Image (cartoon, grey):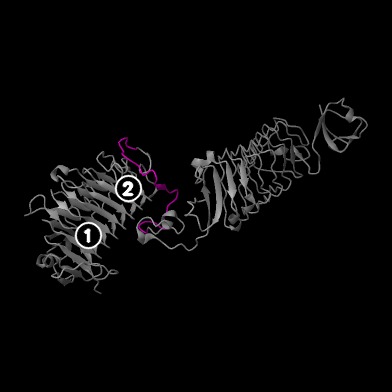
Amino acid sequence: MLLLTGLCMTASAEVINVTPSDDLQAVVNAANDGDILILSSGTYNLNPTVDDGTGTLVSTGAVKIYKTITIKGDNITDQPVLLGRFEIYDGAGLTISQCVVDGSMNSTTDQIFNYKLDAAPTGTTFGALDIESCTITGRQDGKGLLFFNVQAIVESITFNDCIIYGIETVGGDFIDSRAGLPRQINLTNSTFYNVAQGRDFIRIDDKSENFPGQAGPVVTVDHCTLYNVGVYANGAQPNYRLLYVRFLGNEIIFTNNLVVGTVNKRGFTNQYLSDAEPTLDNNYYFECENLTSPGLNADASIKWFDVNGTVLTETPFANAAPDFTLKEDCAPNFYKVGDPRWLVTPVASVMPYAVLSNDNTTLTFYYDDQKWARGGMNIGPFESMDSQSWYDQSLSITSVVFDDSFAQCTTITNTAYWFNNCSSLTSITGIENLNTSNVTDMRYMFHFCTHLTSLDVTHFNTAKVTNMRNMFDTCSGLTSLDVSNFNTENVTDMTRMFQHCSALTSLDVSTFNTANVGDMSSMFFGCVGLTTIYCNDTWNCIKSFDMFFDCTSLIGAIAYDETKVDVTYANPDTGYFTRTGDTAITKLKADDGLLKGTSVFSLGGQQRSQPQKGINIIGGKKVVVK
């Protein structure tokens, strides 16, 4: 299948068909400027060394290019494999498209593309290097992808629609210009993975004094996916940078890229001659250091950060490397960031998400297809106290809104940590739109919401919830809380559930089924204002350390005793519970006139001639006589 799409042929250009049995160097030598070599599928050994005895390939070498030619595979789905490397001489230009270039058997560690001067003088201008729709790899200990170490000019160096991998750069930089002027370096619509792991990704030394009056190089990296670029193979942190560009007057454009796993100590650059105002736009980062802000072992000399870049909190990839296909619902997929080959068409566009207002005060939950248009955030599940998407702004949030659209969402299974540390939160609107019928984890949901004075959870369906640990912990502003509708038959952990709800005066837990609860430690710890806990049942639990500690106002069948604070006293007969239907306990002095002329009984039902100190039943009411 012969494809000539995209090739610009001059009138004198000749199309030369090449097969794997041909000597590619001989074909190149016989070609004229502008000729197009069409390679059929198969493997081409470039200047090979072969074992004389066995005929086995020992190593490959370089094809030398002295003319401006094009090498193109004739079948994009079965690309010819070129084992070797290329040396470009004396002003030549080279286009390679629809080929696999594999330097893993090269006899030297030299770069895949290497510029040289033979007969041409210094100051020579090379034609463009255009590498299109190719897969390129090399020796793991290879020096890099490209070396431009001659006092010359190259019009442009372009890698477009390529996958380039496995060249760790040992003893050189990945794209390395030491002596010349590359007018343009363009990396577009391509993927680079496991490359430049121990050196600079792009290096251009300042040789501007050799090219007076010439504009500096323009470096463009656009719509590329970079994975493990700038991190040693063993995970160690290199003392290098992505863009070591110091040719005077350079311009840097870094846009629409997805960067994962770059942890260079010097970030983008620490070179003072690099573009002081680079174009950085619509870039996304995951598990990177020193690119958007100072991070691990940041070098003090870093010149700039992509302060508007988006830092992802979870991997954007659906699969393991080297398959970099994006998740349908991740922001890079929606905004078409990174190498376009990895984009997918979202199947389900309607999803739950949250949006934080520009002033960080209002958090609104939606369920629609506008997540990325609104700049929406993921809503979990979150696994730690500082993992929610809005944690860094949690102290500023004063109001939470559940939009009417959220009522249609039935897929929420985890609300853990949602409002953790929202200590300025004063109102939650539309919480009835939160469908919790499938939620299993509510731990720390309202933890430390200290300024919340009211909270309506009466509609919560908790039938599937197993974890209510610290759910209302330190909601110290709540004066009332109705949890009488809670179904807790599957809950196993109620540790610190109401801890430090210090403004509550009564709590009805009469519907709680605690048969499966294994831990009630500190469940009511520090509820200093709590006088009544309504419950008709006797609770049992394996762990209940400090369950009622510091509940100094609590009175049930007995008054609070600081020595009696575990689950033993979680009952309405000899503990701190009050049966439903009982009115609040009245505290009176023994000589109070209200005690006269009424029937007096003990808690066990025995009639008394007069009230005694402690708890009495007088006129159907519990009365504590001091």
Find disc 2 in the rendering and name its residue: 279
Whether tag 2 and tag 1 are in contact, CB under 8 A, the answer is no
Give whichever of discs 2 and 1 has the lower sequence position: 1
Left or right of 287 on screen, residue 20: left
Q: Amino acid at mark 1?
A: Asp
Instruction: For the N terminus, give its image quadrant.
Output: bottom left
Q: Amino acid at mark 2?
A: Thr
Instruction: For the C terminus, give its image quadrant.
Output: top right
- Magenta portion: prevailing SS class: loop
Left or right of 543 on screen, residue 212: left
Label for residue 266? none
Specify the farthest residue to the bottom. Answer: 1
Specify the farthest residue to the front. Answer: 213
Q: Is residue 626 magenta?
A: no
Magenta segment boundaries in residue numbering: 298-323
- Is label 2 in a helix, a strand or a loop? strand
445 versus 624 height, above or below: below
Left or right of 589 on screen, residue 463: left
**Residue at horizontal 76 percent and vertical 32 percent from the top:** 559
Find disc 1 in the rendering and name its residue: 130
Q: Is residue 310 magenta?
A: yes
Q: Residues within 10 Å of mark 1 (few under 14, many from 20)?
A: some
- In the rendering, at what x and y percent does residue 101 appear? 23, 61
The foreground one among 229 and 626 is 229
Specify the farthest residue to the right. Answer: 597
- In the rendering, at what x and y percent does residue 241 appear? 29, 43
- In the rendering, at what x and y percent does residue 226 appear? 33, 52
The foreground one among 471 and 459 is 459
